[in-house]
Image (cartoon, rainbow, N blue to C red):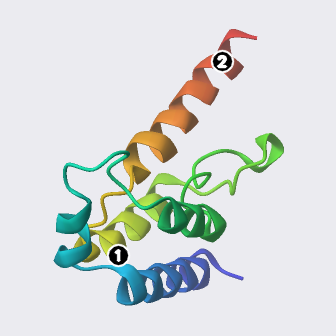
Amino acid sequence: MSADDHRALLRDSIRSFVARHGGRGRARALRGKRPGYDRAHWMELADLGCVGALIPTDHGGVGLELPDMAEMLQELGPGLGPEPVIAVAVGAAGLLQCVSDSD
């Protein structure tokens, strides 16, 4: 599968998720509540590979690159999802890289 095919599949998966769960109403309903996101939706995003997107496969992640992550976030944006995808996916990958570099 080419990188373009992979990105198209990723876009379609995220677009489908947003169509099922997205919307301003859901985001507004979660505003001010703890933890501020829906755990069931978070688990589904994790199953789609969003959480481990930038983590290398040898560390249990999906092993995608920044352009793939950009595609993912572009599709998540219209859904106004309150789930902490950027903080976790990008932060975890960066932390893992720092730890790996110090070995």
Camera-nearest residue between 85 and 6: 85
Residue 23, horizontal then vertical, whole percent: 24, 79
What secondary structure is found at the residue carrying circle 2? helix
Residue drawn at the location 55% of the way across and 35% of the way down: 92
Label 2 crowd bin: few (<14), some (14–19), many (20+), radius 10 Å: few
Whether label 2 touches label 1, CB < 8 Å: no
Q: Which residue is mark 2?
A: 99
In the shown orientation, is residue 6 left or right of residue 41? right
Label 1 crowd bin: few (<14), some (14–19), many (20+), radius 10 Å: many
What secondary structure is found at the residue carrying circle 1? helix
Residue drawn at the location 48% of the way across and 42% of the way down: 88
CA gap, disc 2 to disc 1?
30 Å
* Quadrant of the snapshot with the C terminus: top right
Residue drawn at the location 40% of the way across and 41% of the way down: 87
Residue 36, horizontal then vertical, whole percent: 32, 50
Residue 31 to residue 81: above or below: above
In the shown orientation, is residue 61 left or right of residue 43? right
* Quadrant of the snapshot with the N terminus: bottom right
Q: Which residue is mark 1?
A: 75
Q: How many marks?
A: 2
Quarter-of-image position of residue 49: bottom right
Residue drawn at the location 61% of the way across and 70% of the way down: 48
Residue 54, horizontal then vertical, whole percent: 58, 49
Name the residue type under label 2.
Answer: Val
Residue 90 to residue 75: above or below: above
